[in-house]
Amino acid sequence: MTFSPELEARFAKMIGNYPPGRQKGALIPMLLYAQDEVGSMTPDLIQEVSRRLKVTPLEIEEVIGYYTMLAREPRGKHHIQVCTNVSCQARGGEELFAHACSRLGLHNKEKSADGQFSIEEVECMGACSWAPAIQVNYDFYYDMTPEKFDKLIDSLRQMQ
Amino acid sequence: MPDPITLTINGTQVSCAPGTLVIEAAKQNGIEIPAFCYYEGFSLQAACRMCLVEVEKMPKLQPGCTLPAAEGMVVHTESPKVVEARKSTLEFLLTNHPLDCPVCDKGGECELQDMVFRYGAGESRFTEIKHHVDEKQWSPAVYYDGSRCILCYRCVRVCDEGIGVTALGLSFRGVSAQIVPNRGDHLECDECGWCIDVCPVGALTSGTYRYQSRPWEMNHVGTVCTHCSDGCKTTLSVRNGQVLRANNRDRSGVNGEFLCVKGRFGFDFVHHKERLQSPLLRKNGQLQPVSWSEALSAVAAKFSEVKARNGQFGVIGSTRTTNEENYLLQKFVREGLGSKNIDHHRTGDVVTLLDALKGRTGALATVNDLYTAKAALVLGADLSQQHPLLAYQLRANSRHHRSATYLVTPGPVREEQFATKALRSNPGEELNLLPQLSDDLKQHASLTVLYNAAIKGDAVRQLVAFCDSLGIEVKYLPLVDYSNSRGALDMGLLPDLAPGYQPLRNPGLNAAQILSSPDLDVLWVVGANPLKSASLAGEKAFVVVQDLFLTETAQRADVVFPAASAYEKSGTVTNTTGEVQRLKHGPKVMGTKSDLDIIALLARQLNIDLGPTTPDRIFEQIRKTVHGYNVALPVVATGGAAPTTPVNGGVPVAVNPSLISPSGDTLFTSGTLGRYSKMLAKVMEAPGQLFKA
């Protein structure tokens, strides 16, 4: 399996960050960056990372199973993550998540037919001061309300 | 040894070595601290919180499994606070546990059940619906019920650290966390089943044993595995004469708890429907079932007739029968029939080694030596495939004591994972590479050398000479392949050596000569299958076979006696390291007799007096007469392994290397027996194959 030259360069740098024999440490960042390029944790990708970092495919499976940020199936172009953990819940996070689901016509961890949106209920993302918060891909949106959410969706649609 | 430290556990002053964990210090003094995740000999996990203890001057309860004992420490293992904590831990462990004890295989020997019973954690505050996952079959041998799992990681650690297979992992998180196999939905591994044994609950269950029985309904018989020559103790669980399970949870024997797939699952050949259960006699060209008296008379008549006219006998003994049977067989042949033509399938050159080591004592390694040796050198053998216990010992030694391991093998082997140096060589050319290792080997105070059938004849002498040149203490371990290959050699199933390697002046015919002799009158094969790979030149030979199954050799026989397997008889066997252990009969198969009884009955029919013919009396005779077998009887009688000391003067016989050939068995084959084990046939999917020699 081959990656883009940018990603290859990134991997090369990352692997060098760890002392000899500890390359395993690069596993999670490597998977996250590779996911951005490949779309999801494909069997090919697992094999390739396993080969490069000398960890067993099973160890990679363990990591993928543990971290919800690593997806088995490709997500929507805009992956919307709604926090419903304590602070966000206290400030209307659950209602926001319900609204978001009905607005997009999706259930938790589903993807829209056109591949534009996917939605996921997540635990704390460290934005408690501005709860309820959502994250779209790598961008945070704070103090969300159903109205602000609708506007965000409209603007994301226009980006197409 | 450093000075011991003193601490107080439950009001009693105890002492232990510095660095001892509190849980171990307690155990050494007869105090049990319960634990699910802690497992002696493996890495620490501290996952289950069952071993929490109260330590004075420490503000919180401490996990006894990771806390090293310290001087003056005051520990309470069953204080009210501790009991309350354990009760709560159990309440948490039971939140999603299905409590299906009435149908769970583990019921009655379940550690979780025992703990809930002990701490009375019968009530739960949790009213939520239990998280359920369906049971999965990972392989013919291993089933996983995730709902029962308490995530102690014992299975993961024995697989990673003990066996080096890393077939199990843990995935998902929180309430969904589960043990996962290495191939997504199934296992690709050695199928040793150790994960099932160590599981403290019924999450991992065995394909052979599940839903078969309750542990208290079975008799548990400690005997010795009959598959390879490592001599692992295996405890057969027998109900109504049938073996339902094999494991070694009491850690008795040279192997502790270790068993491979053959020891744990390969017992089912005993009850194979093709087992011979009646003597067979050739009538009108067909083998037909007859009574024992008819078959014995036919053989006795033929033997007397051939003996009277001074005809030619040829006897091929077994590598799986007991020492007593081998001893009685050679006595019968030499004294009763007056023949010298006796041999067996030799799988390693022990004889040349004993000669090369003449005058030395303590130069032969035991199974335990592999765990304590500073360094080991493996020549030719794929230990993980052919001697799994020895591979386990070396791995454990490397893990616990950082011992050094050097390999010279024809192909890739699993021991390379931890080897200090690994070299590749064509079979038989291993010695050429040894000079490359001599500087490394010289650094170690002592060395254990293991070699297989690739090194035989003069090569063994060269090996000893090389090791002598290192100037360090060297112990040798000549590898042989079958469960009593060593016993067959020791008991003199050889044309030129009597029991105890006593040379005979006029040697008889060896196995190859017997089979190729056109004048052969009688071929008597006890528990062997020589005609699988060779043909019989003596067309007029009367063939008598004692075996479990109608093998290629038995098909050519004129009389076949149905023999009992090693699991069905008493006696002793000697493993590849020369340690004697006792077999105890577990199951019973109707219509069969032990080879000892068959030989004794034949002797009686022929009016040959062989003396007493019970296993105990013969072993007594062996202890008195066979050099090196004067072992401590209590050790053997209580199921222990007693090392024999066969090295004495020289053994002035020329070993013909062409008579020594390895069995070629892998982890999943076991000669004739393996063919009749359904479980071994089913699990043939594992990685790692014996390199082609």
Image: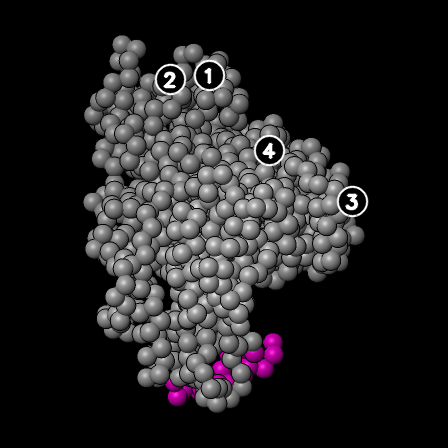
Q: Chain letter for mark 3, please.
A: B
Badges 2 and 1: C-beta atoms under 8 Å apart? yes
Can you tell which of label 4 and label 1 is closer to the viewer? 4
Q: Chain letter for mark 4, please.
A: B
Q: Which residue is mark 3?
A: B435
Given residues B449 and A77, the one toward you in this image is: A77
Residue B17 belongs to the span the image colors magenta: yes
* Precedes in sequence: disc 3 or disc 2: 3
* Vertical relation: B236 (above or below) B409: below
Q: Quadrant of residue B399?
A: bottom right
* Precedes in sequence: disc 2 or disc 4: 2
Q: Which residue is mark 4?
A: B691
Q: Which residue is mark 2?
A: B556
Image: magenta residue range: B1-18
* Vertical relation: B543 (above or below) A32: above
Q: Which residue is mark 1?
A: B536
Q: Amino acid at mark 1?
A: Leu
Looking at the image, can residue B396 be seen?
A: yes
